[in-house]
Image (tube, helix red, strand yellow):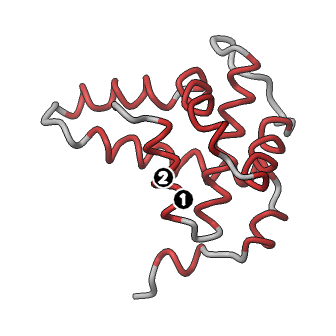
Amino acid sequence: MKDLLSEATLSVTEAKMKNPLALAYVGDTIWDLLVRRRLLRSNAQAGTLHKRAVSMVNAGAQAEAFGRIEDHLTEAESDIARRGGNAHAHHAAPKNQDPVAYSKATGLEALFGYLYLSGQLERIAQLFELALPDA
């Protein structure tokens, strides 16, 4: 079986050239997986774990997490996040979400998608720890 990461790894240049919404599409899954893995540190039941995950993966929570890492980003990472946040999806922000928070959340997702696709797993771990230090 091939290494699952090697199948997804692109060069930094190739990853930067991806549509920011495509990066966010991948990054949303990476963020969700990291949150769920973090929550498994507790012995909570599956229903409780799910409720906690939903509270940490929504646009508001992701926007707050982005605020905690924003000052730690490289210029290239900031550019990816900005492009992600400025990208126009074919739908509006959900009714229950603030459009500014939704934009920041999309930027966070695009950043994590970019880092994953370019194989920067250590950087993902560093930023995730800064984003959710006590979760």
The quarter of the rendered structure image containing the N terminus is: bottom left
Crowding at dot 2, Cα within 10 Å, few <14 / some 14-19 / many 20+, comes out as few
Measure how far apart labels 1 and 2 are at the Cα level.
5 Å
> Are circles 1 and 2 on residues that touch, CB within 8 Å?
yes
Q: Amino acid at mark 1?
A: Arg
**Residue 37 vertical position relative to residue 5 in the rendered view, above or below:** above
Identify the secondary structure beneath mark 1. helix
Q: Which residue is mark 2?
A: 126
User: Relative to 114, is 35 on the left or the right?
Assistant: left
Identify the secondary structure beneath mark 2. helix
Q: Which residue is mark 1?
A: 123
Q: Residue furthest left?
A: 43
Residue at image x 24%, y 28%?
47
Q: Amino acid at mark 2?
A: Gln
Residue at image x 79%, y 23%?
92
Residue 89 horizontal/vertical position (percent): 82, 36
User: Relative to 115, is 75 on the left or the right?
Assistant: right
**The one of 5 and 64 positioned closer to us in this rendering:** 64
Residue 135 horizontal/vertical position (percent): 34, 32
**The one of 69 and 24 positioned closer to us in this rendering:** 69
